[in-house]
C-alpha cells in the first residue's frame, strides 16, 4: 500500500509541475498552452542528447536544459508567437498552440534523437541511489520528483502572493491598460511568465523521462492528463491545482488495488481517471453556471471577411470544381496502383475533414475529438459486418449515426463554459475513447481490430482501388453539398449571425446553443462516415488508427488548408495521406517527421486566417490577374483627369 502511495505521489508531482506552469502562463497572458507536453518532450530530448549522447554530467546537462534552454525557448516563443496572440480570439490562440503541439516533437526528434532510446536516465544516472523513507525504498529520481513539485508549488504561491513580480502579473491580467499607465511593462511581465512556464514544462519532462521513457505518444498523453488538475483549479487557483494534481496521481495508483491484475478494467481504468475527472468538473461547472443564469463567453470566431463576398465565392467555386475535375479525370489515369490507393485513402480522410468545416469553420468551435467520431464509425461498422452479417455500405451509415449522440453529449458538456473548456472537453472524450471505448475486447481484438470489407452498392462491389476512389469522391461530393446547403439553411444563417456577433445574436433571441449542438452532431456523423470508409479501404478497423494524438494532427492539417473551405478539406485529406507516403518513398528516413512538422507549422502560420492556403492562393492569383489586366488595358483620353494633366503642363 505504501508503495502505491509513493508511486501515486511521483505521478502527482509530475502533474503538479506541469499544471502549475500552465496556470502561471494562463493567468498572465490568458493563453492556454496546449503545447505544454510538447515543450516538455523537447527539453527532455535536449537533456538526453547532452547527458547520454554527448556525455555531459547530469547536473551540467540538467542546468543547461532546464535552467537555460527552457526559459530561452519560452522567451523565443513569446517573442515570435504568443506576444502576437495576446489580443487574439480564443479560437486563434488554441489553433496556434495546437499547431505548436504538433510541430515541436518532430523538430526535437530531428535535432536530437532519431530513434526512441531505451531506458533514458533522469537527473541520476544508473545505478540510481536508493533510500529508505518511512519503510519504503525510494530511488533518487522518485524523491526528486516529489521534492521539486513541493518546492515549485510553494515558490510559485509565494511569488504570486508576496513579491512585486507576482503582484505585477496579477495587475497586468486584471487591468492591463491601468498597469501600463502606472509604468508597468505588460509585455515584459508576460514574457517572464512564459519563461517560467516553459521552465516548469522542461523540468516535468526531464523528471518524467526515467519513469516513462521518451515515447512521444505516452509522454504527451501523460502530460495532457495534467489538464485535469488545471480544470480542477478553474485555470487560476494554484492551491487547488496542486491538490488536484496530487489527487489524480494517487487515484490512478490506488485504483489498481481494487482492480483485477489483467483484462479490460485493468488496462482501461487507470488512464481514464484524469479525463473522467475533467469531464465531471466541466459538467459541474456548466450546471452551476446554468443555475446562476450565467452564459458562456461569446464566441470570438476565426473569421476574416472579404469585402467582395460574391466574387470570393465565385473564385472558390471555380477552384473547387477544378480540384474535383483534376482528381476525377486526371489522377486515375496518371497514377500507379500504389499512389492511386494512397489518394483514395486520402479522399476518405477528406470526408472526415469536412466535419472540421462544420464544427470549426462554420460553428467557430475547436473540437479535438473528430477522429474519435471517425473511430466510432469505423469500429461500429466493423462490429455490424463481422458479428451481424451486414453489408459494409449500410453498416458505415448506421455506425456514423451512432456517433451523433456522442457529439451532442460532448457539446452539451463544454459549450456552456466557452471555447477553451469545450476544447478540453473534446480532448477528454478523445482520450477516453482511446483508453475505455476502443479497448473493449471485441473491438480491440488484441490491437488487431476487426475486419471491415469494401462496401457494395446495388450488387456492385468496390473492391478495386479505382472503384473505391470514385466511391469516396462521390461520398465527398454529397458531403460537400450538405455543407453548402447548411450554410443557406436556418442553422447556417444562425451560425453566420453568431460568427458576426454572438452577443447581438443572443439579444435578438437567436438560440445559439441549439445551432451549435446541431452542428456538432452533424459533424460527428460526417466524421463517422469518413472513418468507416477509411477503415473499409484498408480492410480492417484498428483502434490505433483513430487515437487522439493523430486527431490533433488532423485539426492542424484542416486549419492549414482552410477550415472554412470545402476544397481545403479535400486537399487536407489527400495531403494527410500523400505527404507521408512521398517522404517514406523518396526521402531518407531521417526526414520522416517533416510532414508532421509542416502540418503543425502550417496551422501556426494560418491561425489568424481560417480560410487557409487554398483561399489565400486563389485570391492572390485572382488579384494578380486583375492587376495585370488593368495594367495592360489601353489608357483612355479626354476625361477629367487628362484635362487636369494637360492644364498642369
Image: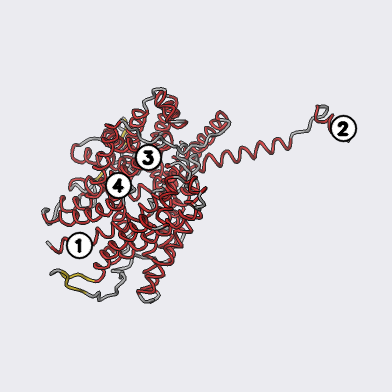
Distance CA(mark 2)–CA(mark 4): 72 Å
Is residue 348 found left or right of 409 in the rendered image? Answer: right
Secondary structure found at label 4: helix
Which residue bears the numbered disc 3?
419
* Disc nearer the start of the sequence (3/4): 4
Distance CA(mark 4)–CA(mark 1): 23 Å
Distance CA(mark 3)–CA(mark 2): 61 Å
Relative to 7, residue 129 above or below: below
* Disc nearer the start of the sequence (3/1): 1
Secondary structure found at label 2: helix
Secondary structure found at label 1: helix
Point out residue 518 in the picture as x, y percentages from the top left corner.
34, 30
* Disc nearer the start of the sequence (3/2): 3
Which residue bears the numbered disc 4?
231
Distance CA(mark 3)–CA(mark 4): 14 Å
Badge 1 crowding class, 10 Å Cα cut-off, few under 14, some 14 to 19, many 20 or more, is some
- Of tags 2 and 4, which is closer to the observer? 4
Q: Are marks 4 and 1 in contact (CB under 8 Å)?
A: no
Which residue bears the numbered disc 2?
646
Secondary structure found at label 3: helix
Q: Which mark is residue 7?
A: 1
Point out residue 258 in the picture as x, y percentages from the top left corner.
10, 53
Badge 2 crowding class, 10 Å Cα cut-off, few under 14, some 14 to 19, many 20 or more, is few
- Of tags 1 and 2, which is closer to the observer? 1
Q: Are marks 3 and 2 in contact (CB under 8 Å)?
A: no
Amino acid at each position: 500500500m505504501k508503495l502505491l502511495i509513493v508511486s501515486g505521489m511521483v505521478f502527482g508531482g509530475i502533474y503538479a509541475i506541469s499544471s502549475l506552469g500552465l496556470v502561471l502562463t494562463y493567468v498572465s497572458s490568458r493563453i492556454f498552452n496546449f503545447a505544454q507536453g510538447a515543450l516538455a518532450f523537447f527539453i527532455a530530448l535536449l537533456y538526453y542528447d547532452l547527458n547520454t549522447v554527448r556525455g555531459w554530467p547530469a547536473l551540467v546537462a540538467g542546468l543547461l536544459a532546464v535552467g537555460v534552454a527552457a526559459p530561452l525557448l519560452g522567451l523565443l516563443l513569446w517573442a515570435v508567437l504568443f506576444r502576437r496572440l495576446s489580443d487574439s480570439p480564443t479560437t486563434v490562440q488554441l489553433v496556434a498552440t495546437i499547431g505548436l503541439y504538433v510541430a515541436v516533437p518532430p523538430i526535437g526528434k530531428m535535432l536530437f534523437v532519431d530513434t526512441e532510446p531505451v531506458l533514458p536516465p533522469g537527473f541520476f544516472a544508473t545505478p540510481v541511489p536508493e533510500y529508505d523513507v518511512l519503510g519504503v525504498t525510494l530511488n533518487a529520481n522518485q524523491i526528486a520528483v516529489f521534492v521539486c513539485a513541493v518546492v515549485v508549488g510553494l515558490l510559485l504561491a509565494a511569488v504570486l502572493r508576496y513579491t512585486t513580480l507576482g503582484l505585477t502579473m496579477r495587475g497586468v491580467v486584471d487591468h492591463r491598460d491601468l498597469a501600463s499607465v502606472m509604468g508597468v511593462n505588460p509585455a515584459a511581465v508576460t514574457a517572464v511568465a512564459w519563461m517560467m512556464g516553459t521552465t516548469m514544462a522542461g523540468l516535468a519532462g526531464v523528471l518524467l523521462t526515467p519513469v516513462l521513457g521518451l515515447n512521444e505518444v505516452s509522454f504527451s498523453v501523460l502530460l495532457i492528463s495534467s489538464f485535469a488538475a488545471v480544470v480542477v483549479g478553474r485555470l487560476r487557483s494554484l492551491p487547488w491545482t496542486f491538490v488536484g494534481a496530487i489527487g489524480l496521481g494517487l487515484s490512478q495508483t490506488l485504483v489498481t488495488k481494487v482492480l483485477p491484475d489483467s483484462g479490460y478494467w485493468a488496462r482501461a481504468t487507470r488512464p481514464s481517471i484524469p479525463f473522467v475527472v475533467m469531464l465531471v468538473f466541466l459538467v459541474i461547472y456548466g450546471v452551476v453556471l446554468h443555475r446562476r443564469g450565467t452564459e458562456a463567453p461569446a464566441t470570438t470566431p476565426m473569421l476574416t471577411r472579404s469585402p467582395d463576398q460574391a466574387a470570393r465565392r465565385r473564385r472558390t467555386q471555380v477552384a473547387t470544381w477544378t480540384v474535383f475535375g483534376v482528381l476525377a479525370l486526371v489522377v486515375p489515369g496518371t497514377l500507379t496502383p500504389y499512389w492511386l490507393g494512397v489518394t483514395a485513402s486520402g479522399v476518405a480522410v477528406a470526408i472526415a475533414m469536412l466535419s472540421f468545416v462544420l464544427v470549426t469553420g462554420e460553428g467557430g468551435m475547436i473540437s479535438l475529438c473528430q477522429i474519435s467520431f471517425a473511430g466510432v464509425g469505423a469500429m461500429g461498422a466493423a462490429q455490424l459486418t463481422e458479428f451481424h452479417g451486414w453489408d459494409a455500405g449500410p453498416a458505415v451509415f448506421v455506425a456514423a449515426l451512432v456517433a451523433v449522440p456522442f457529439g451532442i453529449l460532448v457539446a452539451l458538456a463544454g459549450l456552456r463554459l466557452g471555447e477553451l473548456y469545450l476544447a478540453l472537453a473534446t480532448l477528454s472524450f478523445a482520450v477516453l475513447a482511446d483508453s475505455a471505448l476502443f479497448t473493449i475486447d471485441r473491438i480491440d481484438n488484441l490491437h488487431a481490430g476487426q475486419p471491415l470489407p469494401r462496401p457494395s452498392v446495388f450488387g456492385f462491389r468496390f473492391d478495386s482501388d479505382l472503384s473505391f476512389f470514385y466511391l469516396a469522391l462521390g461520398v465527398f461530393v454529397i458531403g460537400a453539398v450538405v455543407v453548402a446547403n447548411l450554410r443557406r439553411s436556418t442553422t447556417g444563417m444562425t451560425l453566420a449571425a453568431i460568427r458576426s456577433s454572438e452577443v447581438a445574436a443572443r439579444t435578438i433571441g437567436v438560440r445559439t446553443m441549439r445551432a451549435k449542438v446541431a452542428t456538432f452532431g452533424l459533424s460527428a456523423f460526417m466524421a463517422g462516415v469518413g472513418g468507416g470508409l477509411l477503415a473499409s479501404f484498408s480492410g480492417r478497423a484498428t483502434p490505433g488508427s483513430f487515437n487522439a494524438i493523430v486527431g490533433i494532427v488532423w485539426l492542424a492539417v484542416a486549419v492549414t488548408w482552410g477550415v472554412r473551405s470545402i476544397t481545403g478539406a479535400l486537399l487536407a485529406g489527400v495531403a494527410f495521406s500523400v505527404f507521408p507516403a512521398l517522404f517514406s518513398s523518396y526521402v531518407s528516413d531521417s526526414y520522416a517527421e517533416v510532414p508532421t512538422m509542416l502540418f503543425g507549422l502550417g496551422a501556426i502560420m494560418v491561425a489568424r486566417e481560417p480560410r487557409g492556403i487554398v483561399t489565400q492562393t486563389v485570391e492572390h492569383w485572382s488579384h494578380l490577374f486583375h492587376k495585370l489586366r488593368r495594367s495592360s488595358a489601353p489608357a483612355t483620353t479626354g476625361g477629367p483627369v487628362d484635362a487636369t494633366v494637360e492644364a498642369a503642363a
